[in-house]
Image (tube, rainbow, N blue to C red):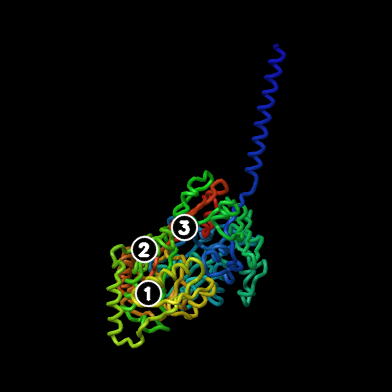
Amino acid sequence: MKKSVTLLIILLFLLLTGCTAQQAKVESETQDQPVTVRLEGGDWGYPQPFTHYSRGPGYSKMYYIFDSLLEKDEKGLIPWLAEKWEVGEDGKSFLFTLRPDINWHDGKALTAHDVAFSFQYYQQHHPVRIHSLVIDPTYLIRIEALTDQEVLFEVAESQAPFLEALGMVPIIPKHIWANIADPKKFIDESALIGSGPYQLTEYNKEQGLYRFQAYQDFWGPAAQVDVLEFIPVGDSILALEKGEIHLADVPADLEKRFEERANITLMEKPGYYGYRLIFNMERQPEFQSKEMRQAFAYAIDRQELVQKTARGAAVAGSMGIVPPHHRWFHSNLPTYDVDLEKSLQLLSKAKEQGNEILKEPLKYQLLVGADLEVRIGEVLKEQLHKVGIQLDVVAADNKSRDSRIVEGNYQIALVGHGGWGGDPDYLRVRFASDLPTSISGKVPGYANEQVTELALRQLKEIDDEKRRDTIMQLQEILAKEVAEIPLYFTTGKTAYRHDIYGGWLHAYDHHNLTHNKLSFLAR
């Protein structure tokens, strides 16, 4: 009997220790496996500074590979390639000191000479995405590497947004780009040698597929995601449910479906992606009438748009342009609640002012992009019909629509884009600048002396509180002018598989978790 008990104890011990050893082996193997995050794909161009697509999914992939002097976290600008910087008392000089021992992906040292070269090269060859002041040699008048680790910039006059403009420029290696005469045609593998945390290992333009691998000798915070894959999917929600991808934005009416899943986390999105209605005042001079634009504003029910097209996951826009979630949002402005009688009165007033172009019936083409924008356009068509304005909704794929906006080939355009959470100098760019038209930029044909004066004043004001006051005044004027109509800003939630990866963050001025490389790095 004693022998049997002893034997049983021995067998149980062996069984338990065997299970523990096997469990430890499995955990060890799991920990050793690379973390792969799969996201929704689509072609956004070759991810070097001259060939990516201009929107967020394009430039963010470029920034996975190329670093800048500064970066953005949840609170603001942080040191990146530069470990510190000094701004002169007059706001006209900027001295950056680089971190030591930073290398390019090919092993060569990154120095201040590469930084100086990058800015000089961009002044000769404009990349897809860069602040206009950076590429203006009459403004940025000195770019000099003082040592291997110090680079000095001097400008003609102080301007508030310029530190961020300098800090977010992608730095390229001089030893590779110095002899490239046409950077838009440079699509060799060497065009993707950067200093950032990831390297591109696969790209298929036709399929919209990207694969990024963590660079093992990255100078900065360790990568928490080893492999990033952007793959083609038909429906991002279904793809998330099937495990094909690991993150997707979730419509408000589907949130409960994901709240019940043990391996899903929902994260709130700030309202920094907005849809706006742009009037082409160059092509259609009648839109230069403030009363005409106000008539549109009073006829459009933005709350109905939120409910019908955004499923409630959005906040209505303000005629002051700056979105409600922005730190400098002016909350005490005319709201332009729906008032059809007021809209009709303003249309009559516009006609009484001698605007002979305004003939009955009022007919306009509304240029929109694909999918959601078509639905928004159809609701706008119904709303404006109530005051006698007829819209012909003309849909194009988003890239074609964007091109037509840049060309000025439209009467009224609907466009959605990010960037609304950034420095409010975009008010100057849209309404008081001579910059080329872009999807998020200049409104063609708009001019107002007060707007121009305030826009230029805020640009040169380096005292933060004084500048904020000027931005508030600018919003007050723009709200009366209805220079354009911000319809709404999407909010809602992003769902992600926390069992795959959970280190996501929003940069302080941006709505998309995947557009900031800090989301994939240790913090």
Label disc, if present, on residue 385 of the rendered structure: 1
Please state the horizontal and vertical placement of residue 504, each as a whole percent of the image. 51, 52
SS label for mark 2: helix
Q: Give the mark nearer the N terminus: 1 vs 2.
A: 2
The residue that label 2 is drawn on is: 303
Please state the horizontal and vertical placement of residue 296, each as a whole percent of the image. 35, 74
Please state the horizontal and vertical placement of residue 104, each as a whole percent of the image. 62, 61
Regarding residue 222, the answer to whether it shows in the image is: no
- Residue 376 falls left or right of residue 239: left
Q: What amino acid is labelled 1 in the image?
A: His
> What is the distance, in whole Å, between disc 1 and disc 2 at their CAs?
17 Å
Q: What amino acid is labelled 2 in the image?
A: Gln
Please state the horizontal and vertical placement of residue 367, each as a whole percent of the image. 47, 75
For the residue pair 203 and 278, the one nearer the viewer reads as 278
> What is the distance, in whole Å, between disc 1 and disc 3 at their CAs?
40 Å
Q: In which quarter of the image is the N terminus?
A: top right
Regarding residue 248, the answer to whether it shows in the image is: yes
The residue that label 3 is drawn on is: 507
What's the residue at 37%, 82% (across, down)? 361
- Residue 407 falls left or right of residue 176: left
Q: What amino acid is labelled 3 in the image?
A: Ala
Q: Nearer the viewer, mark 1 or mark 3?
A: 1
Q: How crowded is mark 1: few (under 14 residues within 10 Å), some or many (20 or more)?
A: some
Q: Give the mark nearer the N terminus: 2 vs 3.
A: 2
Q: How crowded is mark 3: few (under 14 residues within 10 Å), some or many (20 or more)?
A: many
What's the residue at 35%, 84% (across, down)? 360
Q: How crowded is mark 2: few (under 14 residues within 10 Å), some or many (20 or more)?
A: some
